[in-house]
Image (tube, rainbow, N blue to C red):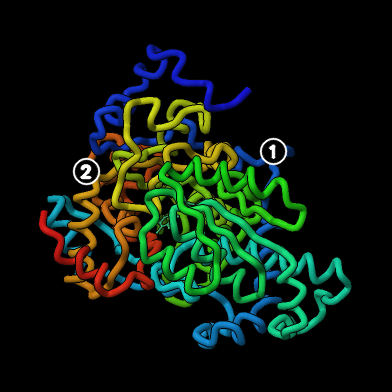
Amino acid sequence: MDKRDITVKSPEFISHIPVIQDLIAARETFWINPYYRSVEKLHGPRREIDLSNILDADERLRRFAHYIVKAFPETQPAQGLIESPVIPIESMHRYLESHYGVQIPGEIWLKCDNYLPVSGSIKARGGIYEVLKHAEGIGISQGLLTTEDDYSILINSSFRDIFSHYRIAVGSTGNLGLSIGVMGAQLGFKVTVHMSADAKEWKKALLRSKGVEVIEYTSDYSKAVEEGRRQAEGDPHCHFVDDENSRDLFLGYAVAGLRLKEQLLELNLRVDADHPLFVYLPCGVGGGPGGVAFGLKQVFKDNVHCFFAEPTHSPCMLLGLATGLHDRIAVQDIGLDNKTEADGLAVGRASSFVGKIMEGLLSGAFTIEDEELFRLLQALDRTQGIQCEPSSLAGMAGPARLLRCHEGLQYLRNHQLEDALEKGTHLVWATGGSLVPKEVMKNYLFRKK
Ligand SMILES: *Cc1c(COP(=O)(O)O)cnc(C)c1O
């Protein structure tokens, strides 16, 4: 059966879930996940992804580091690992307290995926990983590469010639296309990006300048993915990066958990029962934040508490989780238009693959209005001199929102976190922005409210 045939069959069922009324009204809301469980209780024999898969992905990225350094010299300081800094944001902390009128105990730090090399967004984690894994697979299957080799040989024209016989395709609201396009083109692949209507002009132009084929749609993200998938199916030499279902994308994102553990150790930031870690991640289809949160749960177990943030007009993951319907319900089914300036989050139907994995692991989710994203964008620029694109700010309201609402406080009480808050860390995950052209950024920064 086509999943799109299933509209909201039982309005009574849906409307009995309290948070749904807020979603329907496009009101900002904060939801605590009633299905959240201790990580240990979730360990079962049927889990399809575990820590060993993440370690495998991490090793693969390390094999590619010699190549990445050559292809993207800006990764030299991190020796070819595509990683971003974690920084304290004390001035923004004070702004958030006064802006939201709530005290936020503990420290607030920013994970700066907006500064990720190569493609300037969180998509540099999953997207690039999947392209590299695909390239490795081709190299090995043709007998031209072994995992013992120094992968910098991939820069040679002989490899580019081989990859030029293959195509990579992807459907995207912009940033995933950028990651796949930049990495794929660099290796020599032919790349096709199916862009949804939300995609910003500059992202399409940048891709075209790299020789990437950009196909534009007047419809939203789900349609662009569907069309891309359909076209790729007819071509045996085409690999479709499936943002709604890809295990490789997910694993690429999940490596962030291992990396963050190292970074926090270096910074002397402890995470244990007395030092809880709260992480706030902007969510679109779910792969990025889901993969990262999954990795974090593997590493920090019950001492990390993950929250997703979505625009009030595109709360697809919250809707899928709260109803348990996952991809069998879209925001349009409850009367929302899926229109948001946060293009990276303009997704109406969540990934069920991710939703099912996160069902018991996610602490909660909240929605945020576009206008608030711009307020936070401007405040982060003013207080810390850090510039992000609108999507990237969705998590920023998290610490205040958690502490300001009854449900959030109840969560802290239920998990005996109230006393530990003072020694805890809030980590806001910034997800994109360093490639935004100056003129576009100016519009964000001087946008009238
Ligand atoms: C894609 C994206 C996200 C969300 O990732 P999903 O995998 O779509 O959930 C968040 N922020 C930015 C800037 C993005 O491009």
Q: Which residue is drawn at 17% across and 63% down?
A: 94
Count neighbours of disc 1 (C-alpha within 10 A) and say few if under 14, some if 14 to 19, many if 20 or more.
few
Q: Visible in this render: residue 10?
A: yes
- 286 is higher (above) or lower (below) than 108: above
Q: Where is residue 111 in the image (x, y as percent from the top left)?
A: 40, 66
Count neighbours of disc 2 (C-alpha within 10 A) and say few if under 14, some if 14 to 19, many if 20 or more.
some
Would residue 195 appear left or right of 338 to someone viewing this image? right
Q: Nearer the viewer, residue 90 or 26?
A: 26
Q: Visible in this render: residue 427?
A: no
Three-letter code, disc 2: Arg
Q: Which of 370 and 366 is in front in this view?
A: 370
Circle 2 residue: 404
Would residue 393 appear left or right of 346 to someone viewing this image? left
Q: Which residue is drawn at 37% across and 21% down?
A: 17
| Quadrant of the rendering where the N terminus is positioned | top right
Q: Which of 171 and 356 is in front in this view?
A: 171
Circle 1 residue: 44
Residue 212: image quadrant is: bottom right
| Quadrant of the rendering where the C terminus is positioned | bottom left
Helix, strand or loop for disc 2? helix
Residue 175: image quadrant is: bottom left
Would residue 229 appear left or right of 399 to someone viewing this image? right
* Badge 2 or badge 1: first in the primary sequence: 1
Q: Residue 206 carries which label?
A: none
Q: Which residue is drawn at 40% across and 40% down?
A: 364
Q: Position of residue 174 (x, y in %)?
A: 44, 58
Helix, strand or loop for disc 1? loop
